[in-house]
Amino acid sequence: MTHENFKTAEFARATRQASIELARLSTEWKNRALFKMAEYLLKDEDKIIAENAKDLKQAEKNGLSPAMIDRLVLNHERLEKMAHAVQEIAALPDPVGKVNSVWKRPNGIEVSLVHIPLGVVMMIYESRPNVTSDAAALCLKSGNAVILRGGSEAFHSNQAIGAALHKALQEEKIPSEAISVVPTTDRKIMEELLTQDELIDLIIPRGGEGLIRFVAKNSRIPVIKHYKGVCHMYVDADADEEVAMNLLIDGKLSRPGVCNALETMLVHQDVAETFLPQAGEYLREKGVELRGCERTRKIVPYANDATEEDYEAEFLSLILTVKVVSDLDEAVSHIHRYGSDHTEVIVTNNLANTQRFIKEINSSVVMVNASSRFSDGGELGLGAEIGISTTKLHAYGPMGLEALTTKKFVIMGSGQTRHNLHLNQ
Amino acid sequence: MTHENFKTAEFARATRQASIELARLSTEWKNRALFKMAEYLLKDEDKIIAENAKDLKQAEKNGLSPAMIDRLVLNHERLEKMAHAVQEIAALPDPVGKVNSVWKRPNGIEVSLVHIPLGVVMMIYESRPNVTSDAAALCLKSGNAVILRGGSEAFHSNQAIGAALHKALQEEKIPSEAISVVPTTDRKIMEELLTQDELIDLIIPRGGEGLIRFVAKNSRIPVIKHYKGVCHMYVDADADEEVAMNLLIDGKLSRPGVCNALETMLVHQDVAETFLPQAGEYLREKGVELRGCERTRKIVPYANDATEEDYEAEFLSLILTVKVVSDLDEAVSHIHRYGSDHTEVIVTNNLANTQRFIKEINSSVVMVNASSRFSDGGELGLGAEIGISTTKLHAYGPMGLEALTTKKFVIMGSGQTRHNLHLNQ
């Protein structure tokens, strides 16, 4: 389908209409639909895998890297995982209708803040087809209709997954537009959708920095941005060096390719002489390249020179920048300058420094004596995660179901008026 | 100043830098500055009134309406009011640092959500110069730096108010860029500021629908939109008719020119024959023009015919559209179709209908047996109000201080790691 015969506004309007119906559904109803969705992901296995084969064939033709192709592959095991993820979302508490707070006014009206769905959420993502069912399930559970716009490399897979989910919706009498899979990857149509600010409430792009910048630039709708995760760990003068080592190893080595991995370590000068040689040696053995400031290189001479660009980079690989700092102030300033508002860690046993670090660092996740790798919806107890926001909006940091809601004011009165212009006056 | 010699990015960057310092200030420090700001609004009275006179002279030259000119006038009484408003904001609780919730994970890490300032907020507004001090005070109290871009008709007044506020900041050793008054009303510069999405976190436009649409269209930064308030009141079959009359009178007549005034009344057919003649007669006497559907006009023949446009309109004057509906479903559908997500009221003594109305209407404020005129930050207990959001973001409905914050995750650990890649393995 091309943009000549695709009616963007009609497509978005149908999704909006479905969102009104979704917002009213009971938790039980939504959960029934989720279990059915999981069921159909497996029932339609043959069809989905056949469509996936088309994408894989095209990927090979296009010379995609083995890593990219691996992300694309669907098989029985992966479909089972996807179905299981949908069932897990069914098991999470429903965020809709949750009362955030209640207070009474002197005139007797009772004010409460009640969570409601955002309305229509648009996901724009690349490669991994499991995002299709994950995002559909998270949005359905939180009462939102979703527009799913996956990448062209997974087009057939995403359409097939969408078709399976639609069978579940149909059986549960939920309009299929509640999960609107864009039937084309024409970029013009994505651009048109990004201007539908009266029909779409939020855009969540997941993918490379280029994709996110493109979406942010062309959207009239609020965009949850997450360009990169340049996560810092500051080893304070009062750090427990064993804790620091464990957090460093976990943060840098457990999975270097993810956004909550450590990219920079800041070390207080008082512990640099003892801590850096030990840490450096360990990392070097594990194949990590160190890039450090002058003071670092004096202590660990095998470290390379760190440039400005290095301090700004999200390496996602076995490179760590290191800086020796004179005090907490210098560490905080460095993070303000080079950080990405994702996750920062302090290792210390000093209470005053802990309090200052928490107060002065306003990244979305601030950790004290814990690994940056906990910066994840599942690890923090939010259940499944639809993304991570480094945009300071209603959602900042890992986004679970509640981040897909907003709050309305509900006022219970017994006839109160603001002025006394009553009938018999 | 014109856009040729104004450095937009530098201006925004200086504001951002100030925001980092502001975010750290204690409540006491911010309150001291607020009291000083109030003081200087009065100390600088002569200067401000002299600058205001320039705006008034220009306004008369430009032939502005008396109502517009009245909004522009500053005098001793109004400056006292502005100073008092700033003092009241000092007295409100500080939203920064408030802990929203705390939980523990099985591995012992403690997760909490802590309110932090958004960072840099840009206000774009028309005419009333009091917005300059109100917005500056609300942003300072919530730890945000603010960019103030008022209308050209109040240019000199806004600059003079800004200068007074800067004296207070200077005495309290707060960078003057914490309150950045744009020194020009060149539209090009506003457009340039709207693209600084890495330096500005939120845009709040206050003014006519044209201004808000312009800002939303040209901004790469999230915009709090509030186009109009088309507020509905639904009089249910089980309504207390005396309550309905009082809410109607308060909603339509107490101040018809504001966004929380009633524009449309929906009446259940079972009570239309008794309620409509009484209500219609009263409103007619008060000079209100009724525009109704066919069924309405059968009961109150002096009502005019309501068009589609009438149901969509925010009249802000003595006009009320009326529709007789067959049931709650029809009322809800009408609100979904014509509503503006601002405020809707149900008058009823029926519990099931109350619950359905609350569940199915996701406008930012939903009222049961209370006047739409309570839809206001002050009336709902939020303290002062910086705006009303009908954008489903972190702020939806009247926005007080807390709506100028977001939440970060703070994690307290004792050395926990996600994987067990410890030193001695």
Image (spheres, coloured by chain):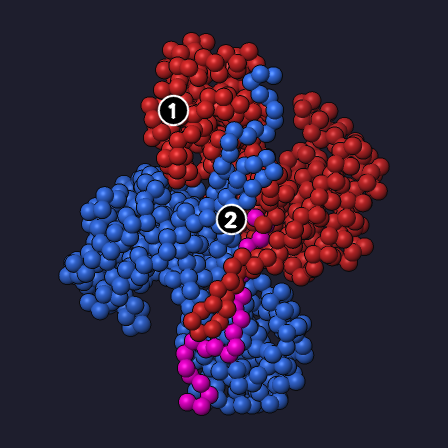
Chain colours: A red, B blue
Q: CA distance from mark 2 to mark 1?
A: 31 Å
- Which amino acid, mark 2? Ser
- Which amino acid, mark 1? Ala
The correct choice, above or below, for B391 with respect to A290 in the image is below
Question: Residue A405: where, in percent of width, then height?
Answer: 58, 53
Q: Say how many tags the image has.
A: 2
Residue neighbourhood size for the residue with mark 2, other residues' Cα within 10 Å, grouped as few (<14), some (14–19), many (≥20)? few
Q: Chain of mark 2?
A: B
Q: Residue at x 48, y 64 (%)?
A: A103
The kind of secondary structure element at disc 2 is: strand
Q: Which residue is mark 1?
A: A237
Q: In which quadrant will I find the N terminus of chain A?
A: top right
Query: Can the viewer see residue B387 in this picture?
Result: no
Q: Residue at x 40, y 52 (%)?
A: B95
Residue A140 as seen in the image, left or right of residue B26: right
Residue A128 as seen in the image, left or right of residue B86: right
Q: Residue at x 78, y 56 (%)?
A: A172
Q: Which residue is mark 2?
A: B101
Residue neighbourhood size for the residue with mark 1, other residues' Cα within 10 Å, grouped as few (<14), some (14–19), many (≥20)? many
Question: What range is drawn magenta here?
Answer: A403-425
